[in-house]
Image (cartoon, rainbow, N blue to C red):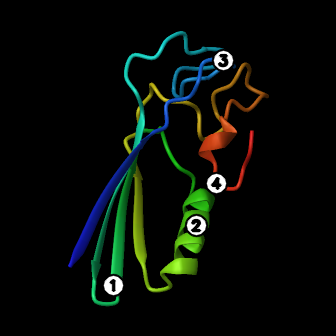
Amino acid sequence: MNVGFAQSVITPSLKKPVFPAGFGTDRRAQTVHDDLYARAVAMQSDQTTMVLVALDLIGFMKTDVQEVIECMHKSHPQGQIVIASTHTHHGPDTMGTWGPDWNTCGVELKYIPGQTL
């Protein structure tokens, strides 16, 4: 059995407005207390690959999870992946609910697969 682990800091820069998830509209992050992480562990045995991912985000939408699964299946067609969010209310909006007002999305696009800044 092969096992691997990786983590990456996903804390957003505060050079442009970051809207923390879960606190209403027009609330902007002022400082960074602790970094946010994406962490993954991968296990492979014979032809089976399983990846477990934890994201320090309020949520990660189903369509985004599906895009990650499709990407994984390109290199590991039989691979399995589980993606979970810690549901922190101190991370950026990844769901489009908390922005400068009720009509403006606060999503930080770098957290969404296939999107660019």
Is tag 1's residue or tag 3's residue first in the polypeptide sequence?
3
The three-letter amino acid code for the residue at tag 3 is: Lys
Mark 4 vs mark 2, foreground winner is 4
What is the x, y in percent for residue 86? 37, 41
Is tag 4's residue or tag 1's residue first in the polypeptide sequence?
1
The residue tagged with tag 4: helix, strand or loop?
Answer: loop
User: Mark 4–mark 1 contact, CB under 8 Å?
Assistant: no
The three-letter amino acid code for the residue at tag 2 is: Gln
Mark on residue 48? 1
User: Mark 1–mark 3 contact, CB under 8 Å?
Assistant: no
The three-letter amino acid code for the residue at tag 1 is: Thr
Location of the N terminus by quadrant is bottom left
Residue at 62% x, 22% y: name it: 18
Residue at 66% x, 17% y: name it: 15
Tell me if residue 80 comes above or below residue 107 in the rendering: below
Mark 2 vs mark 3, foreground winner is 3
Quadrant housing residue 46: bottom left
Mark on residue 66? 2
What is the x, y in percent for residue 17? 67, 19
Is tag 2's residue or tag 3's residue first in the polypeptide sequence?
3
Is tag 1's residue or tag 2's residue first in the polypeptide sequence?
1
Neighbor class of circle 4 (other Cα within 10 Å; few <14, some 14-19, many 20+) is: some
Residue indicated by mark 3 = 15
Residue indicated by mark 4 = 113
